[in-house]
Image: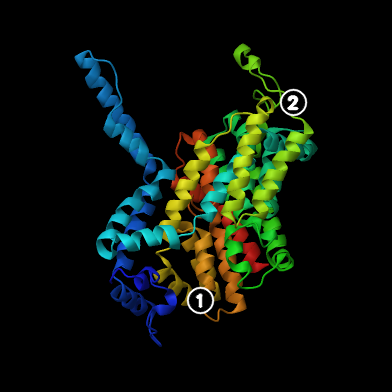
Amino acid sequence: MGHGLEVLTTFPVPLSEYPALAGAGLLEILQQRVSFDPFNLVATAIFCIAIIHTFLVARFTALAHRVQHGHDARLRATGTHGSPSLLAEFLHLIGEVEVVFGFWVVPLLLALSLTEGWAVTTHYLNDTVDYTEPLFVVVIMVLASSRPVVTLAEAGLRRVAAFGRGTPGAWWVTILTVGPLLGSFITEPAAMTICAVLLARQFFDLQPSSRLKYATLGLLFVNVSTGGTLTHFAAPPVLMVARPWEWDTAFMLGHFGWRAAAAITLSASSYYLLFRAELSELARRRPVPDVEQPSEDVETAAESLLPIPSWVTFAHVAFMAWTVVNSHYPALFLGGFLFFLGFTRATAPYQSRLDLKAPLLVGFFLAGLKIHGELQGWWIAPVLASLTEGPLFVGSTLLTAFNDNALITYLGTLVPNLDDRLKLALLEGAVTGGGLTVIANAPNPAGQALLGKFFGGTVQPLWLFVAALIPTLVAAAMFRLI
């Protein structure tokens, strides 16, 4: 390829520009597309390596600890003071799951620059990849985890948990059923953030068993993925198809919404019965202080915050509403976010410290995933187009586990003349499989970032997959059998 303007507007190759192969099989189509643009294979190979890396982050973290301990032992033997090992720090870096896809963007860009040129590379990064979703997730995470919003959400859910006498089990059920359904109205990333913050405070702080921790995380991811389907504007995979397929909220509620609500309730009830004894035992442990209760620690008490006035809470809700309504317009919601930062500074006595690290890491994760994902359409679209209804549902579910489900549904809109039943099967599979891995649904990295500390800093992908399997099967049954 050359490097003129004509080339810059055709990378990656649009799916419609690949030569048509009438009657060709899937393998033949894929081989033809690799021959047409060999970089397809390079981009997918790097993407596969990045996915494998996400399953190995715990090993890198453990190796980093061993390297640092060995480094410290050698320093003690020579009588010198301790210092960090550069190798250990690097292993810690690549042991952070939020860093993985951004890390593998570097070799991707090097390969792209060498094969297509720097002009093509910069055009792809700046003009082709859409970073609206990562930017939105960063902003909504900060807003949803702010003290006034969390306090408001906690007060509302406390009323529901009160029907179960406010026990840890009651909080657990309330957060994992009502919380995900909020995702249909305040967006899934906001619902994930609020659920994760409240679970940390009302449940994970009581130090449940590892089995219950993973069951809770898997249930949270699946329920948030399905809980955003009551409307047509709140879940990323739904947003991709709502306009092209002309699906409105009435349609979503009539076909997806009630099934999702039933699946969420059934899955949470099943896990509650399975872990009922342990959830009851947690009620006998030291209760977690309320978010507004002053600490008994002297230093903390001196820094205790004032009760939140209603006008401050109203302002935070207004900032969230502005962000959700303008979620497709980065200039508007980023501008609103800057005003929000100024507002929190001006109302500091009523605010807790804003956590920017976790949202920024999640944004970095999603941006890296977008950069890689935009180059995978050459093989995902023909795979989807080759499947009938049942296999399409299964294929969409499995592909979602290794790609952002919004990418799967977006590519589905590019398949010409897709039957209405196939459209339903595609979206059903995408939201059903959205809890199987951290990368399956855009809000999942937010949950991982906020709750990862309760899992030793790293969520084990295999145990998450196993924990999410039962609610995934429940959702599949509700969507396909009812």
Rendered position, 52 above or below 161: below
Looking at the picture, tell me which residue is in the foreground, 363 or 226.
Answer: 363
Mark carried by residue 415: 1
| Mark 1 surroundings: few (<14), some (14-19) or many (≥20) residues within 10 A | some
Give percent across and percent down for residue 321.
Answer: 70, 49
Give the residue type that dot 1 points to: Val
- Name the quadrant of the N terminus: bottom left
Mark carried by residue 345: none
Give percent across and percent down for residue 221.
Answer: 57, 49
> Is 453 displayed left or right of 345 in the figure?
left
Residue 318 in view here: yes
Report the residue at 32% width, 70% height from top: 4
Q: Secondary structure at mark 1?
A: loop
Q: Which residue is mark 2?
A: 307
Which numbered mark, 2 or 1, is in the foreground of this view?
A: 2
Give percent across and percent down for residue 161.
Answer: 75, 38
> Is 237 displayed left or right of 248 in the figure?
left
Give percent across and percent down for residue 264.
Answer: 67, 53
Report the residue at 30% width, 53% height from top: 107
| Mark 2 surroundings: few (<14), some (14-19) or many (≥20) residues within 10 A | few
